[in-house]
Structures are given as structure tokens and as C-alpha cells.
Image: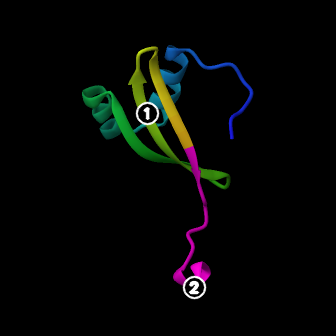
Amino acid sequence: RRIKLPALEHKQVHTLVYDIMNDKQRKEYEENLEVDFSFEVPKLSRFRVNAFNQHRGAAAVFRTVPSKVLTLDDLG
């Protein structure tokens, strides 16, 4: 679901994403202008992140991932 906030500027997105990437992820982003990685906020949530460049600059998509890994029994 979308949040009702104004879009971030290129520099804001770039700073946000760089702050949560490790060195290997930063290198891949710089070489390919795109990188996929996971990010966790302990005791809150996990995210799959796709950071990329588009015609207006840096962009990123954060998708939530369940914090609890389900077993095969949980899945039925």
C-alpha cells in the first residue's frame, strides 16, 4: 500500500539507500545502477530492497518480508 507522503528527491533516496547497503552492494549498484538486497530493522521487520536509477535519478522499492520463517508444517 502506498503512503501519502511527497516523493523523495534523488539525493535523499541515494543517501537513504547507501546508508543501509554494505560495501559489496554499493559496488554492484555503482557498476550496474541497480542492486537487490535484504535489510532488517531488528524486532520490527525485514525488507527486500530493489535500488535502481531511472530518468529522474535514484529510486528504491522496499517490500516487507515476514519476520518469522514458516516451517513446512506451518504452511500445511
Boundaries of the magenta span: 63-76
Question: Would you place residue 11 above or below residue 66 in this image?
Answer: above
Seen at 69% across and 19% down, the residue is 6
Seen at 48% across and 42% down, the residue is 49
Q: Amino acid at mark 1?
A: Ala
Q: Amino acid at mark 2?
A: Asp
| Residue 15 position in % (x across, y down) | 50, 22
Residue farthest to the right, as pictured: 4
Q: Which mark is residue 25?
A: none
Q: Indicate the quadrant where residue 69 lies.
A: bottom right
Q: Left or right: 57 with respect to 5?
A: left
| Residue 52 position in % (x across, y down) | 40, 29
Q: Earlier in the sequence, mark 2 or mark 1?
A: 1
Q: Left or right: 9 with respect to 33?
A: right
Question: Would you place residue 54 above or below residue 36 in this image?
Answer: above
Q: Left or right: 62 with respect to 51?
A: right
Q: Which mark is residue 51?
A: 1
Question: Would you place residue 58 above or below residue 69 in this image?
Answer: above
Please identify the quadrant where the C terminus is shown. bottom right
Assess whether residue 31 is covered by the magenta stretch: no
Q: Secondary structure at mark 1?
A: strand
Please name the residue that numbered disc 2 is placed on: 73
| Residue 10 position in % (x across, y down) | 50, 16
Between residue 16 and residue 58, name the one nearer to us. Answer: 58
Between residue 67 and residue 73, name the one nearer to us. Answer: 73
Assess whether residue 66 is covered by the magenta stretch: yes
